[in-house]
Image (spheres, rainbow, N blue to C red):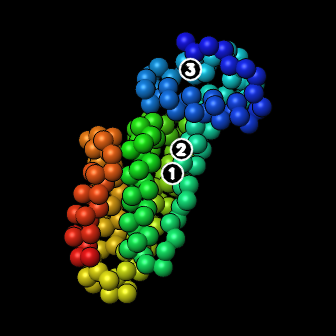
Amino acid sequence: MTPPTPRQPTAARRQQIADAALKVISEQGLGRFTTQAIAAEIGITDGTLFRHFDSKEDIVLAALDRVEERLFDGFPPVDPDPLVRLERFFRARAALVGANPVIARLAFSEELPHAAGERGAQQVESWKSRSLDFVVACVEEAAAQGRIPAGLPAREIGVMVLGTLIALVRFGELAAGPAAADRAWSVIERLIGR
């Protein structure tokens, strides 16, 4: 058990609780996700949790907000070249999930949205849609500029790019550093004819 933590401002404590919830869900799964486990993670009582949140679901929603903040920090990448934007997006996501195993396990799982109910499920769906829409827009713009072969299906390429990130996470490839992302991006570039 972590030693008790000193009193903190509400915003800081809420963030700390949300981060602890992410860690507990990631490491122990939903079956062991309890308010007691969250409280023990940061050295407070579970009663203290409910001075900051109305329910366990509200804690999970705050945890989802933390994941979203990290996933979309600096999003969308800016560059006049759509393929450079796409590469920056891919590498940024790969670096993020490679350096943050908690985000890697939760951003691509169904556990977290399941614990947060309908609102949580909708929030995670919006992450997927925003990411896929961005990739598709980059591919369509590059195709319109004649930068990639005409006729490549933009949506399928988007699914492939995001699926590659998921596969790199699932197989633990990103934990060792950026080399796996470099190799994967190189293959994607060859597949889209760049």
Q: Is residue 53 above or below residue 156?
A: above
Task: Report whether residue 160 is seen.
Answer: no
Q: Is residue 29 left or right of residue 160?
A: right
Q: Which residue is mark 1?
A: 71
Number of marks drawn? 3
Q: Nearer the viewer, residue 124 or 98?
A: 98
Q: How far apart in space, not on screen, are marks 2 and 3 (Cα)?
A: 18 Å
Q: Position of residue 39 (x, y in %)?
A: 61, 19
Q: Would you name the residue on which mark 2 appears? A: 67
Which mark is first along the chain, 1 or 3?
A: 3
Picture quadrant of residue 169: top left
Tell me the residue at 58%/49% (across/down). 69
Locate residue 86 relative to residue 23 in the image: left or right.
left
Residue type, label 2: Val
- Where, by quadrant of the figure, is residue 105 drawn? top left
The residue that disc 3 covers is 41
Please state which amino acid type lies under the numbered disc 3. Answer: Glu
Label pair 2/1, CB-CB below 8 angstroms: yes
Q: Residue at x 74, y 36 (%)?
A: 11
Q: Position of residue 176 (x, y in %)?
A: 30, 41
Look at the picture and state if 26 lies above or below 184.
Answer: above
Return the residue nearer the eye: 185 or 123. Answer: 185
Name above or below for residue 90 compared with residue 172.
Answer: below
Label 3: element kind: helix
In this rendering, position of residue 13 left or right of residue 154: right
Residue at 50 percent across and 29 percent down: it is 23
Distance of label 2 from label 1 (alpha carbons) = 6 Å
| Sequence-earlier tag: 2 or 3 | 3
Amino acid bearing label 1: Leu
Mark 2: give few (<14), some (14-19) or many (20+) Cα within 10 Å.
many
SS class of the residue under badge 2? helix
**Marks 3 and 1, how far apart at CA:** 23 Å
